[in-house]
Amino acid sequence: MAPGATLLIDGSSLAYRAYHAIPVITAPDGVTETNAVHGFISFLSRLIPDRRPSRLHVALDADWRPAFRVDALPAYKAHRVAAEGDPPDPVEPQIALIIEVLEAYGISTGRSEGYEAEDVIASIAKRSDGPVEVVTGDRDLFALVRHPHVRVLYTLRGVSELAPVDQAWVNAKYGIPGDRYMDYAILRGDPSDGLPGVAGIGEKTASDLLRRYGSLDAILAARDLSPTVRAKLNRGADYLVRARRVVALAEDCPVEGGTGEIPDAPVHAERLRALQDRLGIAGPLDRLRAGVRLASAPS
């Protein structure tokens, strides 16, 4: 494989993107849905030759709602917890199938008990000596671009269009110091994760404050804040303490998984062929094999 960045893929994020981007496809049994599987593999088949990574890891959620985050802020993702009688998540079974395919091909997956995929990505990125590219549809990972060697490839439309996110991009998009996305997310909140933010401080105020003072700590220490803003921050003081523990990515979690080496050919060929026949994914797998060969070819 030609030398390049370590490529870290947010497996859950990309699987959900693929599921919603592609109409329902069923396996030869006529029952098992496979549109997320088709989309995920097809995306890999384009991404690998395009980025030519030196190593590749697909990060997985061992726990999508870790106890340490819920303990800090019980509202964290609480609205996503299924209630009695709710239909099952249609994507989870397909994520299990994607993992089967990746393992049969020999593409590394990474997980850490008690942590989310974003923590796995943050931990691998921290330990990487060279450049790192992170593919995700989760804005939480924008916080990683505070490390100069990390760039996020953010999915804009399905999984077909990627925005290259670095500190300059964050500054241009949000009007904040490029290494302070985490502070911005804490202040404004994120309803999709159950983070309320500081009441009365929305995106514009959060951006203005960070642009003026540079960081959340500097904002809290400032002596020239308006009485109105100071009162809002004081009322949100407990939330700010808790939110830091929730939003901060765990960069030192123990990651289980492969080395990231991309095999020239499937490692478990017979197992992969059985999955191909059972799931009806010959086309996506042919494209993946071709993409790996193309990436391996001399530039």
Image (cartoon, rainbow, N blue to C red):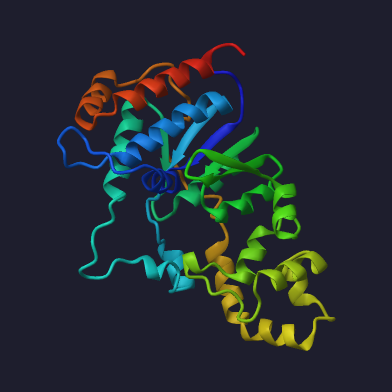
Q: Which residue lies furthest to the top in this view?
A: 298
Quadrant location of residue 218? bottom right
Quadrant location of residue 258? top left
In front here: 166 or 257? 166
In front here: 120 or 46? 46
Q: Is residue 12 left or right of residue 128?
A: left
Q: In this view, does 223 lie to the left or right of 5?
A: right
Residue at 34% of width from left, 41% of height from top? Answer: 36
Q: Is residue 34 above or below residue 1?
A: below
Pinpoint residue 280: horizontal percent, then vertical percent: 24, 29
Q: In this view, does 202 lie above or below 7?
A: below
The quarter in which the C terminus is drawn is top right
Pinpoint residue 296: horizontal percent, then vertical percent: 52, 15
Q: Which residue lies furthest to the left in this view?
A: 29
Number of callouts in the render?
A: 0
Pinpoint residue 156: horizontal percent, then vertical percent: 55, 47
Q: Residue furthest right?
A: 224
Residue at 55% of width from left, 66% of height from top? Answer: 245
Residue at 41% of width from left, 47% of height from top? Answer: 12
Q: In this view, does 119 lie above or below 283?
A: below
Residue 192 seen in render: yes
Q: Is residue 284 left or right of residue 205?
A: left
Residue at 75% of width from left, 66% of height from top? Answer: 210
In front here: 177 or 163? 163
In front here: 225 or 250? 225
Residue 257 seen in render: no
Pinpoint residue 55: horizontal percent, then vertical percent: 53, 28
